Structure formats: C-alpha cells, structure tokens
Image: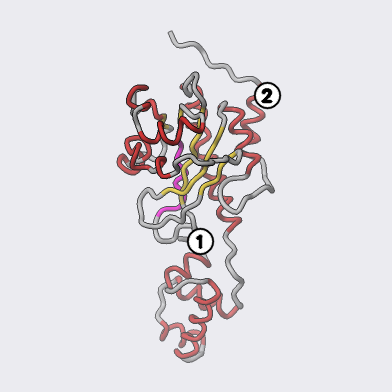
Amino acid sequence: MTSPVTVSERDLRTLLGIVQDKRDDLPEAGLPLSLLAELGDQVGCDDLTVHSANYNWDRADSFMQDFPPTDYGDVDMEASDYRYWSEFTCYPNRSGDLRSVTKVSDFYSARQWHNTRVYTDHMRPLGGEHVLQLCLPGRLGPAAWPRSAAKLVLFRPPGPDFSERDRDLLALLQPHLHQAWLDAERRRDRTPRLTSRQRELMLLIAAGHTNAKIARQLGITEGTVRSHLEDIYTRLQVSNRAAAVARVFPDNS
C-alpha cells in the first residue's frame, strides 16, 4: 500500500510563491535566482542547472546557468557532453516527450551509471550522483525566442535518489516553470523601437502583402518600402521578412 504524501501549509505557500511571484532578479540567461533557490529547497538538491536545449529544430544559442555557481576547476567538462549519457539526455528528442520528469536511474542501473565517462570523469569529481531533468520547451519553430528552449537539471550527492514525490512535484510545476521561462525570455527580448511608419509597414508585411501592394496602400514608392525594410532589418538585426515579423510580433508567431 502506497503511503500518503502530505504537504504542509508552509510548503503550499512556497509552491504558490514559485508559480505566482513576480521577480526582479532576472539574469542575462536562465531563470530568476530566487525561483531556483526556492525550487531547490522544495525538491532537496545541492545544485541546479538551466541550460540551452534543442528539441525539434536547428537553433539554440548555447548557455548554462548554475545555481549556486559551480567551480569546475580541472574537471573534464567535455566528459559531460550529451553523447556520453545519451539515453538520458536525448530521451526528450528521441521520444518527443517534453513533459515527463526523468531521472538518470530510469535509464541506467547503478553499475552502468558508475561506468559511464560522465560519471567517472565529471560527476564524481564534483560530488554528484543523482540527476533529474525537466524540459522547458520554449516556443517551437523559426519564430522562437533567441535561446528558445532549455532544460532544468537537478543534482544530488551520494545518498537517497530523487523520490517519486520529487518527480510528481516537478511534474505539477512544469507548466508554471515553463511559463516562468517564457516570461524571462520575453523580458530579455529587447526589440528596438520602430517608427510609427515602420510599424505600420510591418503590420502589412505580417499580413503577407508584397512590397508593391504595401507601396500602393501607404502611398509611397517601392524604393521607399525597400529603404524602410533595410532600416528595419538593421534595427532588429535580422536578414529577412519572416525574422523581422517574429521579433516585432512575437506573441502572434
């Protein structure tokens, strides 16, 4: 018989804070540090990492956020590459399952895990043993945010593995953490301001109009439309119409 899982009033308030609080400590990449601190306390882990992920397309700027900051010293960083524990790291890509919370122990026995390069050359020197991962899918497709998608990875030292309670807790929080990730990316998206005429032109581009049709509608020449577009591309640091539309109107992509 399964033992009942109890949640204290304090835990409930903390969980509500994780999913509802507005936070000002937004880093250059990743999630607010206060959110990661509260999440780590709830799950019970030594370290958390948020890093870029590439689930369904060929675009993901590389970044990694450690909480708390980790001194890797002379540890072999190449040994942590996804190739050396791909059954675990690549499960979301291979299965298309971006919702499940997975543990290293779901894919490897203790003996198998201890014989991997990632464990012997990277994890063990850092004092890590147990790993849990959660996907933050971001926005899929060519209109994705600059970093788009990420994984949240939690680490524990030798001792008890992450429990089913930990897994269930993260599964319940997953949509809220995903939204926190999207909100953080939205706040970091510093789209340069366009003139009212340029924004009017972008509305027509988003509607699929050609330069000739835009010129007729705005009462300007096609050459002027092209000049506006060149300036818009420079301001937005993009090279085509689709990318410009994605930056100006991200919510409609």
Q: Give the residue furthest to the top.
A: 1
Question: In the figure, is residue 103 to the left or right of 28?
Answer: left
User: Which quadrant of the view contains residue 200?
Assistant: bottom right
Q: Position of residue 234 (x, y in %)?
A: 52, 77
Check the image and report above or below for 39 versus 252: above
Stretch of the chain drawn in magenta: 132-140
Task: Look at the picture and state if 42 lies above or below 220.
Answer: above
Q: Which mark is residue 250?
A: 1
Q: CA distance from mark 1 to mark 2?
A: 37 Å
Say what secondary structure mark 2 lies in.
helix
**Residue 223, x across and y down, in percent:** 46, 90
* Colour scheme of the picture: secondary structure
CB under 8 Å between discs 1 and 2: no
**Pointer 2 residue:** 10
Q: Is residue 49 above or below residue 140?
A: above
- Please give left or right for residue 240 compared with residue 235 in the image: left
**Residue placed most toward the observer, 122 or 178:** 122
* Amino acid tagged 2: Arg
Give the quarter of the figure containing the C terminus. bottom left
Residue type, mark 1 in image: Pro
Q: Foreground residue, 91 or 131? A: 131
The residue positioned farthest toward the left in the image shown: 94
Position of residue 62 measured from the top left corner of the image (x, y, whole percent): 46, 53
Q: Nearer the viewer, residue 113 or 18?
A: 113
Residue 216 on image: x %, y %: 46, 88
* Mark 2 residue crowding within 10 angstroms, few (<14) / some (14–19) / many (20+): few
Query: Is 128 inside the magenta-drawn segment?
Result: no
x 68%, y 24%: residue? 10
Name the element at disc 1: helix
Question: What residue is drawn where x is 58% and y is 80%?
Answer: 197
Q: Residues within 10 Å of mark 1 (few under 14, many from 20)?
A: some
For marks 1 and 2 on the same chain, the one whose residue lies earlier in the sequence: 2
